[in-house]
Amino acid sequence: MSVIARLNSRRRSGQSTVELVCGLFVLVPLVLVLFDLAVIVIGVQVNDQTCRQAARAAASGDPASATQRAQAVVARANQQGSSMLSNFTLITPLGFTPNSVVADAAALVPYGGTVSGTVTVQTEVDIHPFIVPYVYSGGAPLKFRSSQTFPFTHVVKNTAN
């Protein structure tokens, strides 16, 4: 093999290496951003699901303890959360005023009756992706809020003799 053929072979090999490195400079950040966007989408879906479960729990049972039931769902979400999803919070007060609903229920005693309406629950979650927060918020977690409304009906028992 001649000297010129060896030099051409080395140049082609060097050119391939430079093209690979340039391609990786574009490909690696693109893959990381796509991974971050997937984390954000999954986090928003988990927050929506948690909010829906909290609204469902708040709408079932005695209106006086609706906040405690919704808070229990949010606490369970915090226990099950990963390092990328944290700090699920219940935005209070709930969509109905528990005191007015409790007063309506108290007005039905001793003859009983139904109290109905809707309850709105809002939750918020902090999402910690790898790259996106540094671009948009200087490293602070991204906060997403969800709101769900459910109907409720509570039956006050007849206690009259």
Image (tube, helix red, strand yellow):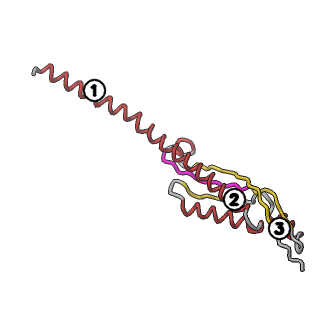
Q: Which mark is residue 102?
A: 3
For residue 126, side relative to residue 157 (left or right): left
For residue 104, side relative to residue 64 (left or right): right
117 vs 23: above or below:
below
- Say whether residue 121 is magenta: yes
Identify the residue shown where x is 10% and y is 20%. Answer: 2
The secondary element bearing badge 3 is classed as: helix
Mark 2 → mark 1, Cα distance in angstroms: 62 Å
Identify the residue shown where x is 69% and y is 59%. Answer: 56
The secondary element bearing badge 1 is classed as: helix
Badge 2 is on which residue? 56
Tell me where residue 10 appears, x and y as whole percent.
Answer: 20, 26
Badge 1 is on which residue? 15
Mark 2 or 1: in front is 2
> Local crowd at mark 1 within 10 Å, few (<14), some, or many (≥20)?
few
Mark 2 or 3: in front is 2
For residue 57, side relative to residue 19 (left or right): right
Q: Where are the magenta residues, as a range?
A: 120-130
